[in-house]
Amino acid sequence: MSEDAKQEIPDELPQYAKVEDLMRGVRAWLNPQNGFRVVRLHMYANPAKRTPEYETEIRKGISHAQFLREYHLVWRSFQGRPVYLDDWNRNFHVSKEFLRFAPHLPVLRGWDFGVGGSACVFAQLMPEMRLFVLNEICESGIGVEKLLEEVKSRSLEWFPNCKRFLDVVDPAGFARSPTDERSCVLIMSQSPWFLKPIPGIQNPVTRRNSVVKFLQRNVRGQPSFVISPACKQVIGGFDGGYHFAHNKSGQLRENPEKNDYSHPHDSVQYICTRVFDIDTSSIDYGNITIAQPSYALMG
């Protein structure tokens, strides 16, 4: 928790009503269905409960999910242990406003393919090695061609005049499909897409550590890892949706649970494993002309 947590953690407010901020920790709105006035009281209404010391004390003896539910009004129920529990700080890492992209810098797209769901996360490496996670696409039950169509459409909509997209994919995307003998990467490289994706690093520990390095780093008090509020699934995953589940004996499993949150988080990890392989020395951050990026890919 930051020294002065000026924002409440949850984002679970009604979208159908105009929410009023009556005072710190107190919000109100009218229910349009019955006309009732609803007042939402958060613990930050009490100044004594806004300090890091207070939160450290109340965390003792309860799970992360219980802490979010009981003290921050986050009603989503997450089981297990959040993958980034010790390094994630929602108030610090989530931007208060939607992030804007820099047209003169490449947009990094991280791809994850799977039967249960697919995802593409969009990010940019900003000056001083700050990674901005700008937007996300999360789909279930669609093939790679449909995902490609969606990514192309959104790329044009969200990043007009972008000079270059760099694609980092799930290494499993290089494996051939048992149905038509084509891999996801082969489909991406053919007409009409003609993409040149590179593989992210598969090792789970390396992947998670690559994200932790960004989470732990700051630049003169500003986060090196910044997420736009548009990325609901990525944020929800950091809050606990992306977690280590318990096995039947009560022990935490070695790898995170596969669910709706894991796909965009895999995409984020693939980006983070390769982002420092980009030769940024040739990119002029003050000029819209972008030199051809080069990679020193690890094995």
Image (cartoon, rainbow, N blue to C red):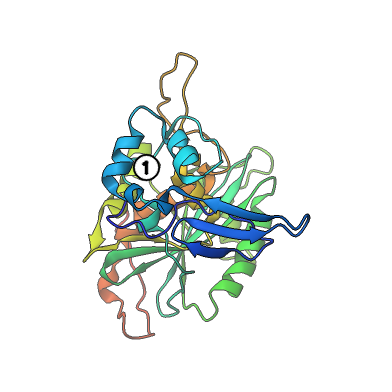
Viewer-proximal residue, 78 or 71?
A: 71
- Identify which residue is drawn at 50% across, 31% down: 79
Viewer can see residue 192: yes
Whole-percent x, y for residue 123 in the image: 44, 63
Residue under pointer 1? 84
* Residue 281 quadrant: bottom left
Q: Residue furthest right?
A: 33
Left or right, residue 26 beside residue 49: right
Viewer can see residue 185: no
Left or right, residue 75 beside residue 24: right
Whole-percent x, y for residue 40 in the image: 56, 52
21 is higher (above) or lower (below) than 113: below
* Residue 53 quadrant: top left
Whole-percent x, y for residue 263 in the image: 53, 45
Label 1 environment density (alpha carbons within 10 Å; few <14, some 14–19, many ≥20) = some
Whole-percent x, y for residue 175 in the image: 53, 42
Viewer-proximal residue, 276 or 72?
A: 72
- Identify which residue is drawn at 62% across, 47% down: 182
- Identify which residue is drawn at 52% across, 81% down: 161
Q: Which amino acid does label 1 sit on?
A: Tyr
263 is higher (above) or lower (below) than 64: below
Element under label 1? loop
Viewer-proximal residue, 132 or 20?
A: 20
16 is higher (above) or lower (below) than 60: below
